[in-house]
Image (tube, rainbow, N blue to C red):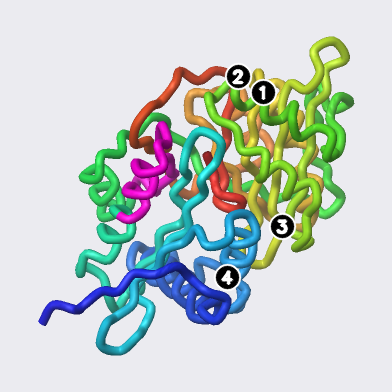
């Protein structure tokens, strides 16, 4: 029997069910593919931080699918309209509703929004080893444009990772840096998302931090945001003019994670960065793809995506 699917935005009353959905969907997929049963490594309700931060940034920009018979949440996704593009957030479908077209309905809804509002493109980062999601996005018209190493770095409690040149140029980001952060991302990547940079500087959820690399002559040559939370410990997004600038930003933000580990999503073609991360003891854990529907301007420098705040 075909399940009737109802779509609507998520509401605050849905937060607990959404947290359980994200936790269950990811743990189930990774368990089926040999990662163990606890991908998140946190209490299920701590996954609600994705709802909190996504909804803080763009309230109401979500779509959830509900079972027309039981009212249960079948799947959900946030999306993030920005100055020139829409970012499609983490897509979650409950294991009980796999194969019923839930993901297809959610993606179609977000692409309809993108077209109707006249945005140039829709972007996402997806797992290269999840063939179901790869097929879902490819059928919808998304094209893989970049490939990334997912690398985990264990940071010693004393923070004794080898230093890199340029760290003296890195400092905490301030609200007055937001416009310059937008300019450099626009120059190097063809997008900007000043609401995300401002949110990271203010950090109302006590989870984010932002740094900038300040060149004495040109101004800001790069920035890095990181998230430290039981549900996700990750560096990114990062935009930098060069690998040297990106590495200085990485080294600075890794100091937040002393005595624990952090995830980075690093462009595979940035070999200097990859080799330095290996020298710091990083290990590969997965591969991701940047996928784009619509326009994709030439990029330069270094761009590292993240999942919270959602990537461009």
Residue nearer the viewer, 30 or 202: 202
Q: What is the CA distance from the residue labelled 1 to the residue labelled 3?
A: 25 Å
What distance separates the C-alpha of mark 1 from that of mark 2?
A: 5 Å
Question: Which label's residue is closer to the chain start, 3 or 2?
Answer: 2
Marks 4 and 2, how far apart at CA: 34 Å
Residue 31 in sight from this viewpoint: no
Instruction: Please give the range of residues in magenta.
Output: 109-128
Q: Which mark is residue 228?
A: 3
Residue occupying the point 88% across, 14% down: 216
Circles 1 and 2 in contact, beta carbons < 8 Å: yes
The image quadrant that residue 125 belongs to is top left
Image position of 275 with respect to 107: above or below: above
User: Which residue is labeled 4 in the image?
Assistant: 47
**Residue highlighted by disc 1:** 184
Q: Are marks 3 and 2 in contact (CB under 8 Å)?
A: no
Please, what secondary structure does the residue beneath circle 4 have?
Answer: helix
């Amino acid at each position: 029997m075909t399940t009737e699917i109802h779509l609507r935005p998520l509401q605050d009353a849905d937060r607990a069910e959404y947290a359980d959905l994200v936790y269950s969907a990811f743990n189930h997929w990774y368990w089926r593919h040999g990662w163990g049963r606890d991908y998140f490594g946190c209490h299920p309700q701590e996954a609600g931080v994705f709802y909190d931060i996504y909804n803080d940034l763009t309230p109401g920009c979500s779509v959830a699918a509900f079972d027309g018979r039981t009212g249960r949440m079948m799947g959900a996704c946030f999306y993030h309209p920005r100055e020139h593009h829409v970012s499609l957030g983490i897509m979650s479908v409950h294991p009980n509703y796999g194969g019923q077209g839930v993901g297809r309905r959610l993606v179609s809804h977000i692409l309809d929004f993108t077209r109707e509002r006249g945005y140039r493109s829709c972007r996402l980062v997806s797992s290269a080893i999840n063939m179901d999601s790869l097929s879902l996005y490819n059928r919808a018209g998304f094209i893989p444009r970049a490939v990334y190493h997912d690398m985990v770095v264990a940071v010693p409690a004393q923070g004794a990772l080898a230093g890199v040149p340029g760290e003296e140029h890195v400092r905490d980001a301030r609200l007055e840096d937001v416009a310059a952060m937008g300019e450099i991302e626009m120059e190097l990547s063809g997008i900007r998302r000043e609401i995300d940079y401002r949110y990271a500087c203010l950090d109302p959820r006590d989870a984010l931090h932002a740094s900038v690399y300040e060149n004495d002559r040109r101004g800001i040559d790069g920035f890095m945001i990181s998230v430290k939370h039981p549900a996700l410990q990750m560096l990114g997004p990062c935009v930098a003019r060069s690998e040297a600038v990106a590495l200085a930003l990485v080294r600075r933000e890794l100091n937040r994670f002393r005595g624990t580990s952090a995830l980075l999503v690093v462009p595979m073609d940035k070999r200097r960065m990859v080799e330095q991360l290996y020298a710091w003891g990083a290990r590969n854990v997965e591969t991701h793809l940047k996928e784009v529907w619509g326009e994709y301007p030439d990029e330069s420098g270094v761009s590292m995506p993240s999942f919270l705040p959602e990537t461009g």
